[in-house]
Image: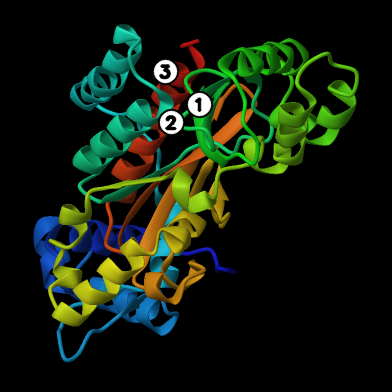
């Protein structure tokens, strides 16, 4: 989006309107600005500045109110050219560390435990709908595999992937195998595949197992199933959500129709995951999509702020979804700190 360079006065007034609207959810008038902010110029001057901002589409007048509210363009200008990044306060830092860190300290959790804890803390601190996407796994390092016979025709395959990540798949068998046979194949698979990425395994498993001395029927079944066993989990299975109670409590979603639309969107896990995964306008690692910049029509009244986190060479995403009347600075602070904390927690546990 192209902007002209606003004057200092215009920036001040636009920033105040956005900050006040975030807190009050009510249109902001020139009298309110003059009374509550010592800008050093008159009510009439503020009205003129607001008229200029309205003419250029940065603010608008809802209904017949004397006040103004920010438009998507106004929010975008604010996010790109006015907003400053600051660090999270110590109380919130401690809260994040205690809730995520305790799992790694106990060494009893899996990645799912850590990510579920992370999304709950993110929702509580941001007071918004929060989403965590577990990392894509193609570049993840395979550590070991185990097989558990559930019956004569069913087997569970458990893949341990770099750090705390585990993938479990139940396979239907068209052959009968013994525990001894399974153990032999497991040993060969772990010897020849450990340390490779899942993408490398999918490409080369046939060659790597071609001369192995183990049960050929079971080995061939594993080779044929490699595309499923060593593939990505579907995007909706990588999704963790928390904080629905906070977003439905916002004034923007008081109307039953708006609440229905919001809940329908949240229940569509595939669309929710794509919203957070979608790359938009970024400042450093933070991506902020405002209103119609979002890829789903149901999200046109929302802002989505997201950032990646890293586990080795794997990348996941954290996101906060809320009304466009969002405390952007706080959302960015929370996400940046949470991403660093989550990366450290997952990368530091083997």
User: Which residue carries the number 3 mark?
Assistant: 345
As helix, strand or loop, the secondary structure at mark 1 comes to strand
Callout 3 environment at 10 Å: few (<14), some (14 to 19), or many (20+)? many
As helix, strand or loop, the secondary structure at mark 2 comes to helix
**Left or right of 210: which side holds 176?**
left
User: Which residue carries the number 2 mark?
Assistant: 339
Mark identifier at residue 88: none
Q: CA distance from mark 1 to mark 2?
A: 38 Å
Question: Where does the N terminus fall, quadrant-wise?
Answer: bottom right
In the displayed structure, would residue 146 be above or below residue 324?
above
**Left or right of 204: which side holds 253?**
left
Q: Position of residue 28 (x, y in %)?
A: 18, 71
Q: Earlier in the sequence, mark 3 or mark 2?
A: 2
Q: Position of residue 342 (x, y in %)?
A: 41, 25
Disc number lying in front (1 or 2): 1
User: Which residue carries the number 1 mark?
Assistant: 149
Cβ–Cβ below 8 Å for labels 3 and 2? no
As helix, strand or loop, the secondary structure at mark 3 comes to helix
**Left or right of 51: which side holds 346?**
right
């Amino acid at each position: 989006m192209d902007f002209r360079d606003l004057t200092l006065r215009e920036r001040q007034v636009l920033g105040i309107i956005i900050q006040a609207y975030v807190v009050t959810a009510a249109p902001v008038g020139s009298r309110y600005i003059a009374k509550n902010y010592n800008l050093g110029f008159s009510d009439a001057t503020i009205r003129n500045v607001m008229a200029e901002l309205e003419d250029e589409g940065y603010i608008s007048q809802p209904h017949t109110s004397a006040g103004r509210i920010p438009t998507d363009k106004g929010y975008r200008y604010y996010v790109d050219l006015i907003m400053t990044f600051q660090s999270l306060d110590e109380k919130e830092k401690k809260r994040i560390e205690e809730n995520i860190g305790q799992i790694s300290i106990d060494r009893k959790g899996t990645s799912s435990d850590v990510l579920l804890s992370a999304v709950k803390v993110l929702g509580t601190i941001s007071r918004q709908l929060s989403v965590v996407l577990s990392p894509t796994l193609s570049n993840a390092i395979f550590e070991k595999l185990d097989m558990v016979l559930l019956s004569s025709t069913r087997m569970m395959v458990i893949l341990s992937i770099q750090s705390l990540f585990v993938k479990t798949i139940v396979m239907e068998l068209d052959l009968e195998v013994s525990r001894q046979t399974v153990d032999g194949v497991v040993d060969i698979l772990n010897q020849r595949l450990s340390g490779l990425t899942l993408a490398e395994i999918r490409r080369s498993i046939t060659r790597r197992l071609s001369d192995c001395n183990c049960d050929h029927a079971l080995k061939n079944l594993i080779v044929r199933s490699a595309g499923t066993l060593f593939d990505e989990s579907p995007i909706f299975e990588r999704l963790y959500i928390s904080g629905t109670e906070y977003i439905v409590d916002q004034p923007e979603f008081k109307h039953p129709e708006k609440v229905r639309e919001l809940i329908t969107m949240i229940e569509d896990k595939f669309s929710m995951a794509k919203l957070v995964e979608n790359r938009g306008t970024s400042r450093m690692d933070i991506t902020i999509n405002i209103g119609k910049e979002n890829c789903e029509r149901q999200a046109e009244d929302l802002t989505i702020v997201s950032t990646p986190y890293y586990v080795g060479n794997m990348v996941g995403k954290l996101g906060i979804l809320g009304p466009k009347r969002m405390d952007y600075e706080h959302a960015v602070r929370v996400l940046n700190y949470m991403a660093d904390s989550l990366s450290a927690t997952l990368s530091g546990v083997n």
